[in-house]
Amino acid sequence: MKKQVLIADLIPLIKESLDKDKHVIFVPSGSSMLPTLIGGKDEVTLARPDYLKPLDIVLYEREDGIYVLHRLIGIKNGEYLMLGDNQVYVERGIKREQIIAKVIKFTHRGKKTDCSDRAYRFKSNLRVKSRLVRKIFKKIKGK
């Protein structure tokens, strides 16, 4: 039986495990990373965020205390730019110290994917680049 726990309650344990160079596996919630991740169903494996690059999925804490799992799409003037795969607006101003972990692999609909896989990274890049087209369609649909 699966028990739902708030991520905020797990953060100290996640940080402790990552500090010991261990990986953490959990099932995220929400829909901001669709279609890559289905909240409440798919699993992610977290590791220390020692080296980050665009297209990595990271776990970070917003200034308001909300924990988010989004894709890093760029770094500008020392600030990290984040975007959920199901979103069209870039979140700016994330600082390095807000980033807790990065996803190194995940299981989506029973299929395991390593985040360093070239085909996966190519597909992720297409998803990020399609943001402007998705933004236009969202505006049209909203009218």
Image (tube, helix red, strand yellow):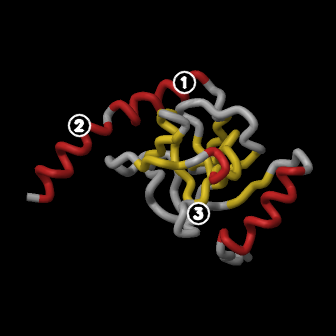
The reply, left or right, for residue 23 in relation to residue 59 is right
Residue 131: where, in percent of width, then height? 31, 39
Work out whether residue 7 can be spotted. yes
Q: Which residue is labeled 1 in the image?
A: 119
Q: Residue furthest front?
A: 77
- Residue type marked 2: Val
Name the foreground residue: 107 vs 138. 138
Q: Secondary structure at mark 2?
A: helix
Crowding at label 3, few (<14), some or many (≥20) Cα neighbours within 10 Å?
some
Residue 117: where, in percent of width, then height? 63, 26
Crowding at label 2, few (<14), some or many (≥20) Cα neighbours within 10 Å?
few
In the rendered structure, which disc, 2 or 3, sits on the residue that comes first in sequence? 3
Q: Which residue is labeled 2 in the image?
A: 133
Residue 46: where, in percent of width, then height? 73, 48
Q: Which residue is labeled 3 in the image?
A: 67
Q: Secondary structure at mark 3?
A: strand
Q: Residue furthest left?
A: 143
In the rendered structure, which disc, 2 or 1, sits on the residue that comes first in sequence? 1
The reply, left or right, for residue 129 in relation to residue 31 is left
Please name the residue shown 54% across and 60% down the image: 62
Work out whether residue 35 can be spotted. no
- Residue type marked 1: Ala
